[in-house]
Image (spheres, grey):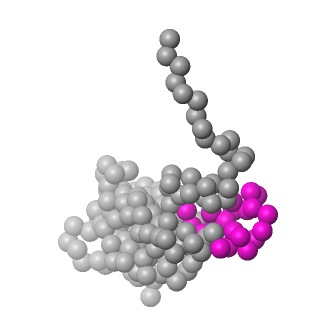
Amino acid sequence: MYNPPKSKKKPESQLSASARALRLVARRDYTRQELRAKLAPHVEDAAELQALLDDFTERGWISEPRIVEQLVHAKSARLGASRIRHALLKRGIPEDLIGPALVKLGESEPDRARSVLARKFTAAPATPAERARQVRFLQSRGFSFQVAMRAACSGDQEDGSGDAITDGE
């Protein structure tokens, strides 16, 4: 019978803050705020935790611009700009990093809304109630009202005149 050698790993409770942080960032990307929250119960000195976070940031192991890029890429096919903004804020990303990423998303928002709508609904809305249902669906996914209306009504406008939708002006 084979007996594998005993592991020489320390129990989780005996890990240093640095080892614990390294183990966390090896699994997935964390923002400074998320990592601080995970490590705070295990570190007595706040200055030590701040120095550790600064070191990890300097080494590139914590990169909030990278997290923004990854999250936007992962969620942009399914969600609108407001839901993506909310997800980024929830993870503790600063507003100055979110703004530029969402500007790029705004350019493709109408196309992404039509794509999301086409995946969910097979036919263009036949009644105002069905159109309202589709608009509510898109709004729940984070698309603005104007974008949602344009996407829901795009099947109605075969001639492309745009008379059925106004920009609210």
Q: On screen, 105 above or below 11?
A: below
Q: Which residues are magenta?
A: 30-51
Left or right placement of residue 5 versus residue 52 in this view: left
Q: On screen, 13 above or below 115?
A: above
Q: On screen, 25 above or below 94?
A: above
Q: Nearer the viewer, residue 23 or 164?
A: 23
Q: In the rendering, at what x and y percent does residue 22 appear?
A: 56, 57
Residue at left offset 69%, top offset 68%: 49
Left or right placement of residue 136 versus residue 157 in this view: right
Q: Nearer the viewer, residue 70 or 46?
A: 46
Question: From where the camera sits, is residue 115 visible?
Answer: yes
Q: Nearer the viewer, residue 98 or 146?
A: 98
Q: In the rendering, at what x and y percent does residue 160 appear?
A: 22, 74
Residue at left offset 47%, top offset 70%: 60
Specify the quadrant of the image occupied by residue 46: bottom right
Q: What is the number of callouts on the image?
A: 0
Question: From where the camera sits, is residue 142 visible?
Answer: no
Left or right placement of residue 106 versus residue 41 in this view: left
Q: In the rendering, at what x and y percent does residue 23 appear?
A: 56, 52
Pick out the residue farthest to the bottom.
Answer: 169
Residue at left offset 76%, top offset 58%: 41
Residue at left offset 61%, top offset 70%: 53
Label the magenta part by its dominant secondary structure.
helix
Q: In the rendering, at what x and y percent does residue 64 appear?
A: 50, 72
Quarter of the image that includes the C terminus: bottom left
